[in-house]
Amino acid sequence: MSTLFTRIIDGELPGRFVWSDDRAVGFLSINPLGPGHTLVVPRAEVDHWVDAEPDLLAHLMSVSHAVGAAVREVWQPPRVGLLVAGFEVPHLHVHVFPAWDMAAFDFANAAPSVEAHEQEAHAEKLRSALRAAGHGEHVAG
């Protein structure tokens, strides 16, 4: 059975994509820790990050780096958070989000929901920043 993220990647469920390449995608979290909170997800269904091949992990970090730079450019937080938790969905994913303090890393502080127009505005800001940084060929949408 496909994971929730595979169903999003395959278009069976909606997602606000900001990145897409042959190995990974990036889409906004529906319960964000901050504006532009992006999940970087491999297309391959790998549950635990230690089970992923090193070259896939390197690719996910490269994508996360590009998305993180865009998050920093758009929202200018003092830090850009990066987490691999994996308890919510059994499909490897990297959380990339703006962090103004350590509370930003606590999922208890995640937004229970975000208005669709606000999420789309965040996604478009990230897409624009990614294009401006030279990643246009991988910008989704």
Image (cartoon, rainbow, N blue to C red):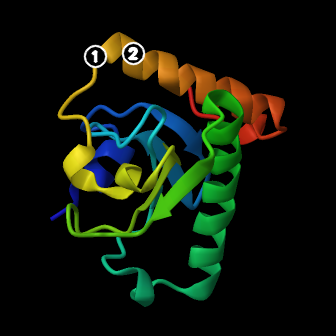
Say above or below: 8 vs 123.
below
Within the image, what quadrant is residue 48 found in? bottom left
Is residue 9 at all visible to an observer of this figure?
yes
Residue at 51 percent across and 61 percent down: it is 82
Circle 2 is placed at which residue position? 118
Question: Horizontal and vertical percent for residue 94?
Answer: 45, 62
Q: Position of residue 52 (x, y in %)?
A: 47, 83
Residue depicted at 58% across the width and 42% down the height: 19
Secondary structure of the residue carrying numbered label 2: helix
Answer with left or right where residue 118 lies relative to residue 18: left
> Which residue is depicted at the point 35% across and 34% down?
15
Q: Secondary structure at mark 1?
A: loop
Q: Is residue 74 left or right of residue 31?
A: right
In the current view of this chain or complex, which residue is farthest to the top?
A: 117
Residue nearest the viewer, comparing 132 with 75: 75
Q: Quadrant of the C terminus?
A: top right
Q: Is residue 5 above or below residue 12?
A: below
How far across and down, in percent of the image, does residue 122 sit? Answer: 50, 23
Q: Are marks 2 and 1 in contact (CB under 8 Å)?
A: yes
Quadrant the N terminus occupies:
bottom left
Could you tell me the amino acid type at mark 2? Glu
Visible residue check, residue 10:
no
> What is the crowding at mark 1: few (fewer than 14 residues within 10 Å), some, or many (at least 20)?
few
> What amino acid type is highlighted by mark number 1?
Glu
Q: Which residue is mark 1?
A: 115
Relative placement, left or right, of 59 versus 8 is right
Please report the residue visible at 70 percent of the width from the left and 50 percent of the height from the top: 66
Q: How many marks?
A: 2
Calculate the distance from the C-alpha at mark 2 to the C-alpha at mark 1: 5 Å
Please provide percent x and percent y for residue 129: 72, 30
